[in-house]
């Protein structure tokens, strides 16, 4: 495959990926209520990371989001003020502050997630079963490559995976 073909395919994948992200975001903002309607994409990302983890420290959030701890702390503070996130001290280590999604926001997020999922059910129905099956096969390969790229490596033996 030539470099031009690679670039053309990469551009198509990138552009289509943005369309899919926009579909998710439109459904998110269309079904969110209260303070959740006003969130920026980085704030939505932070809330989703906190939601996936259950409870997370500011330091962990900063690492997962690729931002500085002060930036993560400022974002969390704004979301706590909006009653989307809650902070509490760790029972194991009182020096640690844990962040999680508030029960009220969790209920709204479940409704939003259901609406976004329904949007994808609609998309799958529109593209048909054969195309959907092929899309799943492609995404499985993409997932596999990305998971390999995210696997931690040993510092003493960079080529070896950490067990």
Image (cartoon, helix red, strand yellow):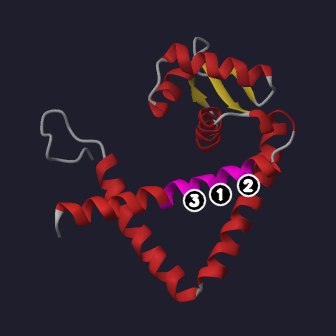
Which residue is nearer to you in this view: 5 or 106?
A: 5
Residue 148 versus residue 64 in the image, above or below: below
Q: Are circles 2 and 1 on residues that touch, CB within 8 Å?
A: yes
Q: Are circles 3 and 1 on residues that touch, CB within 8 Å?
A: yes
Q: For the residue carrying disc 3, how many other residues have a C-alpha within 10 Å: few (<14), some (14-19), or many (20+)?
A: few
* Residue at numbered disc 2: 27
Residue 121 versus residue 154 in the image, above or below: below
Instruction: Determine the residue located farthest toward the bottom in the rendered image.
Output: 130
Residue at coordinates 31% horizontally, 62% vertically from top-left? 8
- Residue 90 in view of the camera: no
Image quadrant assignment for residue 33: top right
- Circle 2 — which element? helix
Q: For the residue carrying disc 2, how many other residues have a C-alpha within 10 Å: few (<14), some (14-19), or many (20+)?
A: some
* Residue at numbered disc 1: 23
> How much space separates mark 2 and mark 3, taking CA atoms?
11 Å
Image quadrant assignment for residue 143: bottom left
- Residue 49 in view of the camera: yes
- Circle 1 — which element? helix
Image quadrant assignment for residue 52: top right
Residue at coordinates 49% horizontally, 61% vertically from top-left? 16
Residue 50 versus residue 18 in the image, above or below: above
> How much space separates mark 3 and mark 1, taking CA atoms?
5 Å
The secondary structure that most of the magenta stretch takes on is helix
Q: Left or right of 30: which side holds 44?
A: left
Residue at coordinates 74% horizontally, 25% vertically from top-left? 86
What numbered label is drawn on residue 79? none
Q: Which residues are magenta?
A: 16-28
* Residue at numbered disc 3: 20
Q: Position of residue 46 (x, y in %)?
A: 60, 34
Which residue is nearer to you in this view: 93 or 75?
A: 75
């Amino acid at each position: 495959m030539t470099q031009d073909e690679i670039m053309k395919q990469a551009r198509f994948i990138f552009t289509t990926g943005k369309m899919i992200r926009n579909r998710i975001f439109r459904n998110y903002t269309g079904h969110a209520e209260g303070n959740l309607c006003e969130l920026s994409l980085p704030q939505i990302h932070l809330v989703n990371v906190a939601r996936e983890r259950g409870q997370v420290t500011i330091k962990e959030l900063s690492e997962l989001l690729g931002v500085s701890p002060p930036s993560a702390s400022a974002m969390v503070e704004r979301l706590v003020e909006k009653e989307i996130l809650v902070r509490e001290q760790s029972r194991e280590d009182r020096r640690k502050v844990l962040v999680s999604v508030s029960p009220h926001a969790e209920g709204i997020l479940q409704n939003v997630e259901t609406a976004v999922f329904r949007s994808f059910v609609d998309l799958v129905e529109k593209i048909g079963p054969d195309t959907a099956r092929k899309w799943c096969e492609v995404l499985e390969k993409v997932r596999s490559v990305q998971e390999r790229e995210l696997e931690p490596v040993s510092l003493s033996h960079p080529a070896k995976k950490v067990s």
